[in-house]
Amino acid sequence: MVYWYQRFRRKARRAFSRSEWLRRVLRQPVSRSTAHEPGLLLIQIDGLSLRQFERAISEGNMPFVRRLMERENYRLNTFYSGLPSTTPAVQGELYYGVKCAVPAFGFLDRSTNHLGSMYETELCKAVEYELSQKGDMPLLKGGSSWVNMYSGGAAPEESHYCGTNLGLRDLFRAMTLGGVLAAIILYFPSVIRFVALFIWEHIAGLWGLLHGVFSKREHIFKEIRFIISRIFIGTGLREIVTMGAGIDLARGLPIIHANFLMYDERSHHRAPGAPFSHRGLRWVDDAIRKLYREAMNSAGREYQVWIFSDHGQETVRSYIEEYHKSLGDTVLEGLRALHDEGVRGFRELPKYDPRSWINVSQVHRDEQAHERATEATAAEQGAFTIAARGPVGHVYLVKPLTPDQKRALAQWLVREGKVPGVLFSKAPGKALWVHPKGEALFPDDAQSFLPHPEALRREMGQDIVTWCEHKNSGDLILLGWNPDTHPMTFPVERGSHAGPGLEETQGMVLLPANTRVPAEAQNFFRPSTLRAAALHALGRKRLPASRRAKVREGVRRLRVMTYNIHSCIGMDGRVSPSRIARVIRSFDPDIVALQEVDCGCSRTRGDDQDKMIADELEMHTSFCCTMERSGGFYGHAVLSRYPVEVISSGLFSAHENREPRGALLAKIDLDGQAIYFLSTHFGLTDIERNAHIAELLGREWLGRTPPEEPLIVCGDFNMMPGSRPYRRLAERVHDVQTLVKHRKPLKTFFAFLPVSRIDHIFVSNHFEVEDIRVPQNTLTRTASDHLPLIAELKVIQSPKPDKAEATYAQT
């Protein structure tokens, strides 16, 4: 009855889903027969560092995401961006597995001699084509891409506002009169909110313009551009992405990647830690809340929602504002100084092409830099080109320099030009970092030079070498960051990224607890490891089996779960062994007792459910059949990380022409320590349960367990505490929920509104109970009609038998 009510409620919710109705009006195609297949929604918060994310959570600017961490069992991890720490490089590695996809956001393409930025559609297309030739299968194949640099393998019609197809045609491609009217009607509250925000952003933007120009001496045209940015990128694009990604969830696309730019744009202008930047995260959090609910209610696929930020930002000083000259001026002065000093290799003055600096000015959009550029003589025409955006500048020299000459120029730029750091490739596999206190050779000096977390240093050391050796990197890479000075950026901005700074390289990633990830992602994620985890979640490329760590000598702990899985039929009507496996994996138990398990039944697609779940969790499994059903078998199972020896498995003799019930008794080898484990499922009537408990306590079942050995008894007993069968079993073993001090026993049934405690775990006197959990979240309330019961146990080596055990030993 409860199951059918839940199904009706979910169907009614889907019937009135705005995304579903808008999909129909727009006649968007849907994925067919994929309701039981996995899907993935990737939500990217552009430019949010791990530190700023933790601050946003603590200050209450992201309440829904905080709720995911507290109630939905999401875990926070460090996301290392790789180098350069910028979106085109991160997404190149995420989509295609290619590290250091580009040397910077703006760079010189040496093959075409074109100086440009990744805002240019043609350059973005060229980079993605090269990545597709180098890399593995594209991550977004068959899915959709929203506001990203690349399509990632998504079809052109599924790539929205991306760098590879950004233009007016894309902006209006999906718009029809009927679609616009339908969107206004279905999303009328959102439309009213958008209009209000549109007006508010104009008012707030005007105030910000006056404050920026007169109080902070910001450039007036820059402030005007920012007003446009905050209205169309911060507000308009956010609403469009939320609506569009919601429609894609209703369509059942296998993977959807939605990127929110609001925080990144605000941070560039006001600084990553500014209150104005953090206020924008409230709107991003609201968008995440809407998409999460759309994903959980989608009939198209069984979606997981992953949230990450591609990189962070540093609060910076501007090189131009600090020293009143451009980076091109500094490099030209350095070349002249070395020429005047007669340094070997600089006697013939290289030529300088002022047009290159004009192009650079267009790349980072700083008009003042060009106005102050040093006038080059006729002999200096055409010597080098600079691509400087953010805290990274690439210097491309026409005349090749030897490593010693590069070193001399780098030292001058650091000493006299006040550039915080200079990198260049010294030899194959080696890169030299020149800084105010000396030099560091990478990757050798990564551990001693970098202040990053220890787990990151080795990885960063190798990435620095790869970065310097990129075919489109400059002969010198000028850095605005080093460990000993305040971060600096070369254009005029308050927040910046692309370099190896502490915050800019460390974003965040939120995944459901114990999500299957590569072994190298134990300490931190990077784009390639997140990619591998995503491919595994989609079933496209399985991760290798992980090795189980041996149980350490001394105190031994066990995490035990009992879970009635309702034949893997969730409250949404979806049959999903993989969802049950996700629930179990979220809590990482050592031993699991499963009840109501189908094996080869036509009603559940003929799946061998216990084996599918065990294979996904890399656990041993033993199945106890209690009856034949729908052309297959039905019963319960025991899953274990440790080897299992089945001692007895079968039916109870008394069932009064009702559903047969039974038990499975096994001995589990905990690396030399024997643990006896019994799983059962009792009947629904008092007569049945009294008969079942009498048999369970007899010689055929618990009578076969040595009283000196640890014993765990668990399952769905269908009996309430205080009932006669419960009291009889409690005389032999202890209910774990009564052994936890200052903790009220937790109910497990019904899943969406627990009102009864019928699932139990009992233990012998060989255990101490450290904790009890009955997790209630969206996943557990949907996966089955029961909630799982989890006990944290500590094995006591030599306990004294209690009176109950002594009595049973004598009988």
Image (cartoon, grey):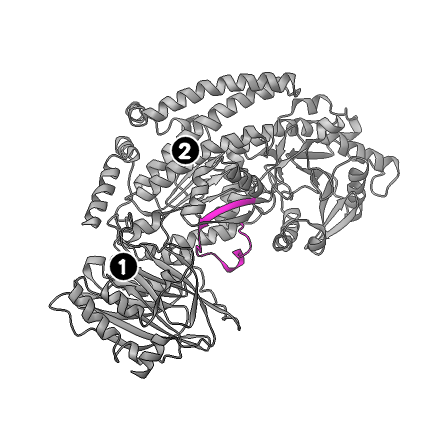
Looking at this view, name the residue that lies furthest to the front: 803
**Among the 4 quarters of the image, the one containing residue 504:** top right
Q: Residue at image x 19%, y 64%?
A: 683
User: Does 461 sit above or below residue 809?
Assistant: above
Which amino acid, by three-letter code, is at mark 1?
Answer: Ile
Left or right of 669 in this view: 419:
right
- 291 up-or-down from 632: above or below: above
Q: Which residues are magenta?
A: 507-526
Q: CA distance from mark 1 to mark 2?
A: 45 Å
Could you tell me which secondary element the residue under label 2 belongs to? helix
Question: Residue at the right extreme?
Answer: 341
On the image, the x and y values in percent for residue 335 come to 80, 35
- Residue 638 circle label: none
Which residue is tagged 1? 758
- Left or right of 529 on screen, residue 735: left
Residue 169 visible in the displayed image: yes
Across and down, in percent, residue 805 comes to 35, 77
**Marker disc for residue 241:** 2
Q: Amino acid at mark 2?
A: Val
Task: State the SS at label 1.
Answer: loop
Q: Quadrant of the C terminus?
A: bottom left
State whether residue 144 is above or below residue 323: below
Q: Check if mark 1's residue and mark 2's residue have beta carbons within 8 Å.
A: no
Foreground disc of the pair 1, 2:
1
Query: Is 758 part of what is drawn in magenta?
Result: no
**Residue 21 or residue 307, whichever sits in front:** 307
